[in-house]
Amino acid sequence: MPATTERPAGKKVLLMATCLCDAFYDDVAKATVEILEHLGVEVGFPENQTCCGQPAFNSGDWKSSRKVARHTAEVFGGDLPVIVPSGSCAAMHFHGNRLQFEECPDPAIDSLADRTWELIDYIVNGLGVREWPGRFESPTRIAFHRSCHLRGSASGEAITSLLSTIGNAEVVPFGQAEQCCGFGGTFSVTFPHISGRMGSLKLDHILEQKPDLLVSGDMSCLMHLTGLAQAQGRPVAHKHVVQVLRDTLPS
Amino acid sequence: MVNRQPIDVYAHQIDDEKQASVLGGSAASTDKRYSALFNDYEDPDAIRRLAGGIKDHTLHHLDRYLEQAEESLVRNGCHVHFADTADDARDAVLSILRDRGITRLTKSKSMASEEIHLNDHLTENGIEVLESDLGEFIIQLDGDTPSHIVRPIIHKNRREIARSFQRGGIADDYNDDPETITRRARVHLREKYVQAEAVITGGNFISAESGRVVLVTNEGNSRFGMAPSRVHIALVGIEKLVPTDRDLAVFLNLLGRSATGQQLTVYTEFISGPRDDSQPSGPEEMHVVLMNNGRTDVLGSNCREILRCIRCSACQNVCPVYRQASGHAYRSPYGGPVGAVLSPILFGDRFPELADLPKASSLCGACNEVCPVDIPLPDLLLRLRDKAKKEHIPQPGDLPMAPFATLATSPAIWRTAMTMSKAMNHLPIQMAPVRPLQDWLGQRTLPEWHGGDFRKWLKKRKETDQPQRTQTSQSPSKSDASS
């Protein structure tokens, strides 16, 4: 994993919206643009971006995933920081790609890895924003699901600490926080029973704390968890961290 | 269910009680591990990395350390046997026993012996083997196999055990009180210990420097087994070497904490050869069988880091897939993430048959986070998925990824597909004959399709750039936005 200080942290960046935001969660991508611009960052959006290639990578088809990764590295060429509102897709850039290009190194892939930031990591550790001037209208209990791809990165701590500075926000801990939500991409369809059980357990732990809001830095986890919760008749309000940042700002 | 993975099918079939005991036991072990490590060390991660580094170094120079270990063991008065295959290891043990006319022995817990089905081999050859670890004793009584590296019978409850005792003639009546069960096992085992002529153990570590064989147990059964025996045979995988005695401090501190949340196991034995004249009891002969059985193949593969493993089971305990599936789902003595990596490559000729194991992970990385020797387990699982794909081993539920790659490298088509797929919102997608979609919708809802909406919004925003930008970038007020 790259050391925080080595990555470029200038105020001109490229946004990788992720395929999930492209397809389902347009508002998360919108909030990302709004918040970055609010912080004085100039956001470029390369039109030809698609996906990081993780679905093929995880399924073991590295020939296919390398093809997608090369495309992405080309689309995001240059020397600007690449900002991703997803810990999972960001980790694909700085970890997964390194693994699948071990035997066929590619400077464009290395460059992408060295310039990629998970969004909140960039805001907190790149831009140095330690406090958020937002405020909830009423006391709000937030359950923050630290998605698995944030392990070993600075993002988990960055998100927790930033959320905690929001007025009226209380980040409530819940049991077995180290456990996965059970999504895992294609894992959720080839292991439907185990994936569902993992998700239900995660929901049990989260809902036990009666949170007002479930927050994560990865929409994939939230898509799985809220999809399960909805189907089980126990829906839970949820937002990406960056939506929280935007929605709590004074209008 | 052609698109479901075998481990998922297995997990679906196990009964609720067994599942609950596996889940509860694992979660408790994970919690204990966490508090044992974090109460005692400011930065456990630094120790994990140190331990991983020591193991890596040893494996990198394994030829040298094996030679040194052999010299040290011989100097200590041990006989050293190198066994290249499982057959060689079984034969080595059997001939030691036959040459000495030994027909009765006790055995303490050893994963290496599970790996080569040593008990079956010895029993077939007329030797009475008694497992002396309580869990393994119950496994043996039931003709079962262990489902956990450290807690072999985590899948059983006391009622089953009480019935086994009755059936196996250990007890006359049914009694499922744990203390009674243990006392009855003890009475039975004590008598057998005295009759045994030899003891077989594994070996948690061997110091190449001193030739000390280190055994850790919680029941003291290996120690008890050694007292009356004439011959001690330690069956040890060649990856169990550490360079020096000093290194043991690192590993012993990590092993107990990682495995059971204990600072140290109840018994830690350092065995420096057979008994000498100053010792009143103990084996007169000590044999160390150093077993390869596929380990050098693993060393030559791109998953060699798995040989660092010290069999603590922390990865198994924390693994959400293992917690649902139990250890038997992994079809080898090694369950959980370590098994999912080790089994397919250790038993090389069984790779096609075991190639689904590395799929049994959401790649959540919890295993790597708890591993006392910092094995990058998710990376190894991924490398094995790549290997399976390269070797064209079909996997249940595999989606063809080539079309996805084509789509994801054709931006114009991608953008069109994003917008066009909006029609999905108006179709009864629960009727769509797309298997993965069906599997998803079986237990979850899907959010509304907003394909292309963000791009449209961004375009519009750029057209009316200035007013929008000024509006949203109004004073960041209290935030410190400087870099």
Image (cartoon, rainbow, N blue to C red):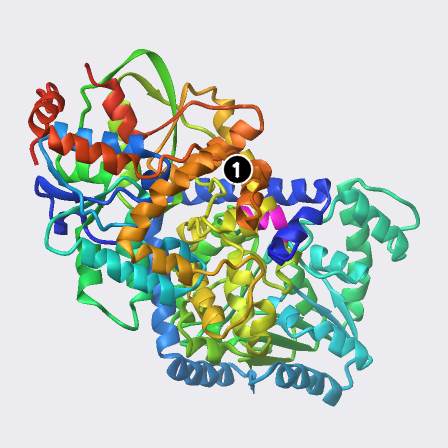
Residue A94, placed above or below residue B421: below
Q: Which residue is mark 1?
A: A199
B51 vs B264, left or right, is: left
Quadrant in the picture for residue B231? bottom right
Viewport quadrant of the C terminus of chain A:
top left
Q: Quadrant of the N terminus of chain A?
A: bottom left
How far across and how far down the image is residue A149, in percent? 36, 46
Count of marks overlaid on the render: 1
Along the viewing direction, whichever of B205 and A28 lies nearer the viewer: A28
In this view of the protein, can residue B278 be seen by the observer? no
Question: Is B252 or A242 nearer to us in this picture?
Answer: A242
Q: Position of residue A148 (x, y in %)?
A: 39, 44
Residue at the spot 62% in from the left edge and 82% down from the top edge? B89
Stretch of the chain drawn in magenta: B320-326
| B87 is within the stretch colored magenta | no
Which residue is farthest top? A138
